[in-house]
Structures are given as structure tokens and as C-alpha cells.
Amino acid sequence: MNANMTEMKSELTTNIAEVNTKLTNVNEQISANKEELKSDLKGIGDKLTTMDKKFEEMEGRIESVENKFENKFVDIENKFENKFEDMESKLEAKIFEKVEDVSISFRSDLEKLKQKVMTGQGDEFKFQAPYSKPSIKLSTYDGKFSWQVYKTQFSIVADANQWDSQTKACQLAASLRADAADILQTLPETQRLDFDALVNALELRFGEKCVKDYSRLQLKSRQQKVSETLQELATDVERLSHLAFSDCPTEVREVLALQHFIDGCVIRNPESSPNGGSQGLKGGPSVCYEIRGSPASNTKGQTPQTSRQRIGHVELRCGAVRATDEKLLE
């Protein structure tokens, strides 16, 4: 057991010696590193000192450059100020010279004018009141005649009166009557004073194609009103036929108008009818003979007998006329 203890002590002593040796080596390395670190720090310090000197030199150079630029700017500013002053003085001298010339010329002309007025030669200097063009009045449009004709007439009046777009819209809206005035109700409030929108709406409603279709529909449904005379009915049917069948020959248009007139007649009691008449079917031959045979309805150069013959011929062709009318309305 003593031997074991001796061995352990010996090993422990050996280990302690090794540790001490290692610690000594570490201390030596640390000392060496400290020296190196001090040397490095000293080198960095020297470099920083050198850089500070260089920065100071750069600041000095920059300050020198700034001073040079300031001096240059001051010189340029002084030169421009001197030039502006010279230009200003020259311009003032020229303006003063021109004003003097104009003043002398004006005084000379004024003296001449006074002399002419004093010697009775001043009539040529009398001022006349400005001439104003008379305003051309505009006719109204109710939709019963050609829209293209009225549109052309309106353009002529608008150009003569020198109306702008808004004035043209106001004048056109104010000139509308009857069916044409109803167009205003179809437009939004923002477009009622828009000339182009108003013209387009009237074009769609009263343009040539629309007028034809609308007039044909009116002819199909046209009936004599209670207080309407046969002569008034005939006049309106003739007007609608002219609009509806303007592209047809005159003979065909007259035949169609007569047929629509016969269809639109309402047979009344002869005692209560203002034009008289006989009992019969609506639009029967008796009414047609009565109107066409009366003196008021005879056209120039036609006798009642001629009218009756023509109506009889039309009635014989009644079926053909209706077929032609239906074909045109399609």
C-alpha cells in the first residue's frame, strides 16, 4: 500500500510539473503576443496620424479651391451687373428718344387738326356711329314640313346673326312648335342646350326616312275627327301622302291618298253632318262621290262627272291599291 501511495505521489508530482511547464509556455506566448499587439497598435497609431495630416492637407486644398470659386463668382457677378446697368441705361435712352419722337409727331398732327377744324375742313374727321346688322327673325318649325329645308334656313339665319353654338341651341329650341317641341321632353336636361344633340334628335324624328315611315303609320290610322270637315280631312290626307310616298309617281300618290281618304271617312247622319252624306259603310262610295262631286272639291279643269268617273275607276282598283299600300309600308 505504501508502494501505491508512493507511485501516486510520484505521478502527481510529474503532472504538476507538466502543468507548470505548460503554464510557463502559455505565459511566454502571451507576453510575445502582447509585444506583437503593442507593435501593431503603434503601427495603426502612426497610420492614423499620417491620415490626419493628409486630411488636414485636403481641407486646406478644398478651402483654397472654394476661395478661388468665390472670387470668380464675385468677378462674374460684377461683370453682369455692369453689363445690365449699361443695357438699362441704353434702353432708357432709346425709349426716351422714341417717346420724344412720338410726342413731337403727335403735337404736329394735333396742330394740323386744329388748323383744319378752324378753317372749316374738319368734316372728314367726323365720327360715325358703328353700323349694327339687323337681326334676322327665325321662323318656327312644327314638324309638318321638311326638316332639311328648315335646317338649311336655320343655318343661313344663324350665320347671318353670328350665333355661337349655345345661342343656336337656344334659338332652335325656342322655334319648335307642336310635335317638334315634344322632342325637348325626350332629351336629358344636360342636352337641351347642346346644339348637336338637339339637331340629331330632330334628324331622327323628322329626317326623310323617319318622316316617310311615320307619315305612313299616320295614314293607316287616320280617321275623321268629330268636328273635322271632309275638306279638312282631305287636305291632311293629301299632306301625309305627299310625305309618305314622295318617291312615288304623282298618279300613284293620288290614288293612295284617295284610298286613305275613303278609309278615314266617318259616315254620319246626313242631318247632323255639316257636309251632308248618306248612310252606308264606313268609307263607302257615297261619301267619296259626295266630296269629289261637290263644287268645293273640284280641281281646276275637272267637272263633277270627271271626278266621279275617276273615283269609280279607283274603287274598281281598290284591292290593287290596298296591296300596293301594304307593300310600300313593309
Image: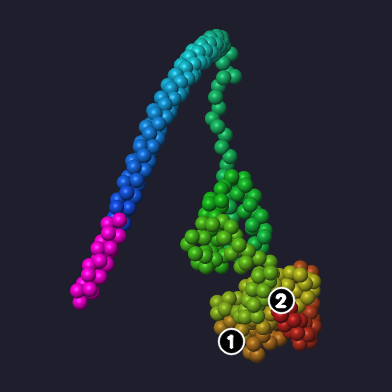
Q: Choose between 122 and 281: the one closer to the eye.
A: 122
Kind of residue at badge 1: Asn
Q: Is residue 290 left or right of residue 35?
A: right
Q: Main secondary structure of the magenta part?
A: helix
The mark lying in front, picked from 2 and 1, is 2
Depicted 78 relative to depicted 220: above or below:
above
> How far apart in space, not on screen, are marks 2 and 1 (Cα)?
25 Å
Residue 315 in view, yes or no: no
Q: Quadrant of residue 143?
A: bottom right
Assign the N terminus to one quadrant of the image. Answer: bottom left
Q: Which residue is mark 2?
A: 257
Image coordinates of residue 154 in percent, x first then y, are 62, 53
Q: CB atoms at circles 2 and 1 under 8 Å apart?
A: no
Image coordinates of residue 291 in percent, x first then y, are 68, 78
Identify which residue is drawn at 75% across, 74% down: 254
Depicted 278 relative to depicted 131: above or below:
below
Mark 1 burial class by Cα count in 10 Å: few <14, some 14-19, many 20+:
few
Identify the element where label 1 is drawn. Answer: loop
Image coordinates of residue 69 in percent, x first then y, are 46, 23
Q: Quadrant of residue 214?
A: bottom right
Identify the element where label 2 is drawn. Answer: helix
Residue 185 in view, yes or no: yes
| Residue segment shown in magenta | 1-21
Image coordinates of residue 100 in percent, x first then y, are 52, 10
Residue 326: within the magenta? no
Q: Earlier in the sequence, mark 2 or mark 1?
A: 2
